[in-house]
Amino acid sequence: MDRDQWQEIGVVLGRNKLRTFLTAFGVFWGILMLVIMMGSGKGLQHGAAAGFGGSVTNSMYIWTQQTSMPYKGFRRGRNINFHNADVEAIRSSVPELDILSPRCQAGGYRGTDNITRGIKTGAFNIYGDYPQYLQVEPMDIIEGRFINYRDIEEKRKVCFIGREVYNTLYEPGEEAIGTYIRAQGINYKVIGVYKSKTDDPNRAEDQEKSIIIPLTTFQQAYNWGDVVGWLAVTAKPDVPVSRVGDKIKALVRQRQSIHPDDEMAFGSWNKEEQFNRMMGLLTGINILSLIVGTLTLLAGAIGVSNIMLVIVKERTKEFGVRRAIGAPPSSIIKQVVLESVVLTVGAGILGIIAGVWLLELVSAGMNAAAEQGGFFRNPGVELPIVLAAFFILVVSGVLAGIIPARKAVEVKPVEALRYE
C-alpha cells in the first residue's frame, strides 16, 4: 500500500465519522466480548483447580460400613473394618494402584476440647497417617517436617499440626518445633506446622484444624489394634481410579466373606469423578462462550459489510470515473476490501487490547484477594485464542469488503457517470 491509498482510506472513513464509529464499535464490542468471555472461562477453570489445592485428582477415599446382605452364614448388618493385613494384601494384589495410604481418625473438632498446651485448649481432629498421605493431599509445610517411616516403625509420639492448631495453642511468632501438646491424655512432640493448599476457605479450615501422628502410634495409643479407619488411594497414570477402587472392594469382600454384590458394605468418594465433572461443565461454558463471542463478532462484521455497501453506493459516480479513465476492476476491489479490512481489524485490535487489559486488571485484583479464596482466579486469554480472533478479524474484513467491491465493479462506467 502506498501513501495515497492510506490517505484515501482515511478520507472515505472520515466522511461520516459517526457512522464509522458506530460500525467500528460493533466489531470492537464483539471481539471485546469474545476475549472477556474466554478469559472468564479460564478464570473459572483455574479457580476450580485451585479449590482442589494441588491434591491428586485421580484419587479416592474408601471406608467400610455395614453389610446389607447375608453371606456364608454371616447375618446382614455386620460391621466391617479394614485391617493392616488388608492394606498389605491390597498393595501386593492391585497392580494398577499407585499410592495407598491408610488413615485413622479421632478427635473433637466442632466438639469438646481434646487438645491442651499449658492453659490453652482446643477441639481438633487427630489423624493417624503414613508418609504417603502427603502425596495424596499436598500441604504447605510452614516449618519442620512431615512424619516419616522411622516415626512409623518406632511408633514415635510426634505430631504434625495445622496452622489453626498453632494459632490456638501458641502465641504469634512463638516457636512450635520441639514443644509438646497433650492430645487425649498423651503428650506429643511437635515436628512440623502446615497450612492447606486449597483456596476453598471452608475446606482449608477443616484441614488446618487437624493434628497428624504416625498411624502405628495412633493404633497403639487409642487401642485400635490393627484396625484402619479408611484408605486414601491413587491410580497409576491413564488408569481410572474407579477401577482401582472396584478391585480393592472385591479383594476385601473376598478376604472378609462379604457378598460379592453387596455395594453397601463400602462407602467411597471419588475425587477424579468430581474433578472431571466440574472440568467438563467449565469446558462446556468455554465452548458456549466461544460460540457466543464469535457470533457477536460476526454480527459486527456483517454490520461492516452493510456500511460498505452504503459507502460503495455513495461512491458509484467516483468508481465510474475511475473505470472511464482506465482503472482496472481489480484496483477498485482492492481499495474497497482494504477499507473494510482497516475498519474491521483496527476496531478489533482495540477490542483485543481492551479485553486483555480488563482481564489483567481483574487478575491483579483476584491475586490480591487470593488468601480469601474464591471460585474465580487468574482469568486470562491464551495466545492461540488471540491469534484465532485476529485471523477471524482479517477474514471477516475481507468477506465484508468483497460483496460491496463486486457491486462496485458490476456497474458499467456509463451508468455510473449518470448516477446521482
Image (spheres, grey):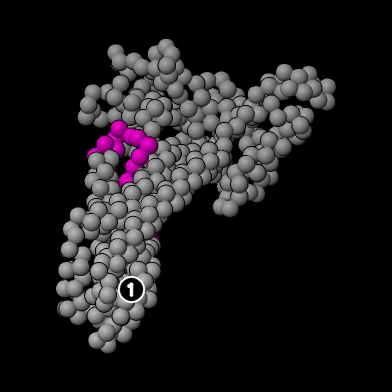
Q: Residue at x 29, y 24 (%)?
A: 167
Residue at far right of view:
73
How many residues crowd mark 1 within 10 Å: few (<14), some (14–19), many (20+)? many
Pinpoint residue 293: horizontal percent, then vertical percent.
39, 51
Q: Quadrant of the C terminus?
A: bottom left
Question: In the depicted view, which residue is nearer to us: 219 or 257?
Answer: 257
Q: Which type of secondary structure does the marked residue at label 1 adopt?
A: helix
Whether residue 351 is situated above or below residue 259 in the rendered picture: below
Residue 232 falls within the magenta-colored stretch: no
- The magenta stretch spans which residues? 368-386
Q: Residue at x 22, y 26 (%)?
A: 172
Task: Left or right? Give the position of 82 relative to 351.
Answer: right
Whether residue 319 is situated above or below residue 146 in the rendered picture: below
Q: Provide the residue designation for mark 1.
A: 408
Residue 384 falls within the magenta-colored stretch: yes
Is residue 101 among what the camera can see?
no
Q: Residue at x 50, y 29 (%)?
A: 128
Residue at far bottom of view:
326
Examine the image and state in which quarter residue 372 appears.
top left
Pinpoint residue 176: horizontal percent, then vertical percent.
29, 29
Q: Quadrant of the N terminus?
A: bottom left
Pinpoint residue 148: horizontal percent, then vertical percent.
45, 39
Task: Left or right? Give the position of 342 relative to 254.
Answer: left
Task: Left or right? Give the position of 391 relative to 282.
Answer: left
